[in-house]
Image (cartoon, helix red, strand yellow):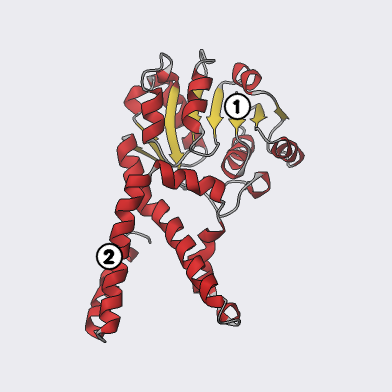
Amino acid sequence: MKAAIVGVGLIGGSFALTLKDNGICDEVIGVDNSERNRAKALELGLVDRTASLAEAVAGADLVVLATPVDSIPLLAVKVLNQVDRQVVIDMGSTKQELCEVIAQHPRRGRFVATHPMWGTEYSGPEAAEHDAFRGRTVVFCDRELSDPDAVEFVERVYERIGMPIKYMSAEEQDTHTAYVSHISHITSFALALTVLEKEREEEHIFDLAGGGFESTVRLAKSSPETWVPIFMQNKYNVLDVLREHIHQLQIFRRMLERDDTEGLRTMMQRANRIRKILK
């Protein structure tokens, strides 16, 4: 099998390595607008060769779209215009706009919308990791709109690399992802800005930073080029969860203002229930 990876950064590069490491592909072809990314992907062995989009699609069995989410809908249309037997997937974390844009395309059935639930705060080909996806869930969206053979093909690929599969509508996926991923990033960005603002007054604040702080703000190192499009494409779901998050912060503030130790304890005990979900 031959795969074309469009976008050879963190996600695309890691998926390329995974396909090669698991012997799924005989050849992985890289496509990227950045000449530097193409050269680095070749240097690091993420891909076997690079090519133009048209050349890569024509020579591939599987086409993987791993570019920023705001570019995926029109890119998907462009790729579907060129496919015949090929299967096309995307790896973006938002799906509603994408699925709406391609809904009426005559080759819609060759597209399988997927979201592997993995990523790090790093970006670019250098950030690609071996065996990044094993054990992580992948979400298939609106699978009933894809050709059965295309769905089965992609299922086999993900199963072979050890990814449990969940099936959702595009709307459900975007809603749930706002709660489990997107709010984590926006909170991390906001906390980093809060501490950076305070650090202007307190020069030693970072000398005291421990593991808890580092893990909480780790996501603030994520690329704006990746996350601004995600926040904008999932704007209404992110705003909804952000309103609830701010509400919870306001409750904690009021309890602190009132010296309400029992209220704080109750809130924290309720929060501890997350242990049953994240074991």
Q: Which residue sits at x=53%, y=46%?
A: 226
Image position, residue 10 (x, y; %): 60, 45
Q: Nearer the viewer, residue 249 or 200?
A: 200
Q: Which residue sits at x=49%, y=38%?
A: 69
| Displayed quadrant of residue 201 | bottom right
Q: Nearer the viewer, residue 254 or 23?
A: 254
Residue 66 in sight here: yes
Q: Nearer the viewer, residue 278 or 24?
A: 278
| Displayed quadrant of residue 261 | bottom left
Q: Which mark is residue 247?
A: 2
48 with respect to 216 (left or right): right
- Residue bearing the label numbered 1: 3
Q: What amino acid type should be assigned to the residue bearing mark 2?
A: His
Q: Which mark is residue 223?
A: none
Image position, residue 111 (x, y; %): 44, 24
Residues packed near mark 2 inside 10 Å, few (<14), some (14 to 19) or many (20 plus):
few
| Displayed quadrant of residue 61 | top right
Relative to 9, say whether 156 is above or below: above
Residues packed near mark 1 inside 10 Å, few (<14), some (14 to 19) or many (20 plus):
many
Q: Which residue sits at x=26%, y=80%?
A: 255
Relative to 254, say whether 234 is above or below: above
50 with respect to 183 (left or right): right
Which structural element holds mark 1? strand
Point out the frontmost of discs 2 and 1.
Answer: 2
Relative to 132, say whether 260 is above or below: below
Relative to 200, say whether 77 is above or below: above
- Label 2–label 1 contact, CB within 8 A: no
Residue 24 in sight here: no
Q: Quadrant of the N terminus?
A: top right
Q: CA distance from mark 2 to mark 1?
A: 46 Å
Image position, residue 75 (x, y; %): 52, 27
